[in-house]
Image (cartoon, rainbow, N blue to C red):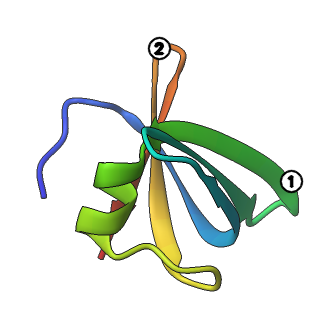
Amino acid sequence: MKTGARNSISGKVTSIKSDEIMSLVKFEVTAPHEMASVLTTESVKDMGLKVGDKVMLVVKAIHVLPVKD
């Protein structure tokens, strides 16, 4: 997948909290630090995100965008 963002960090999904519209997904990143992303629950379901999944975190402006391999 090609993205316009220049910063990317590998991470692992550590938790997902969802309601009908939005989800808060937390990640453990390599350093070991933690990051979080708020995205629609539809996107979480479409990506098939599960706790323990490895993802690349694309950081652009104020957004953290998870990209599943």
Across and down, in percent, residue 14 comes to 74, 71
Across and down, in percent, residue 29 comes to 72, 61
Across and down, in percent, residue 11 comes to 61, 66
Residue drawn at x 52%, y 80% as measured from the top left: 50
Residue drawn at x 42%, y 38% as measured from the top left: 21
> Is 34 left or right of 68, judged from the image as shown?
right
> Is 36 left or right of 56, judged from the image as shown?
right
Of residues 31 and 17, the one drawn nearer to the viewer in this rendering: 17
**For residue 51, which quarter of the picture?**
bottom right
* 21 in relation to 66, above or below: above
Q: Which residue is mark 1?
A: 33
Q: Which mark is residue 61?
A: 2
Residue at far left of view: 2
- Find out whether the residues at labels 1 and 2 contact each other: C-beta distance under 8 Å: no
* 53 in relation to 59, above or below: below
* 29 in relation to 51, above or below: above
Quadrant containing the N terminus is bottom left
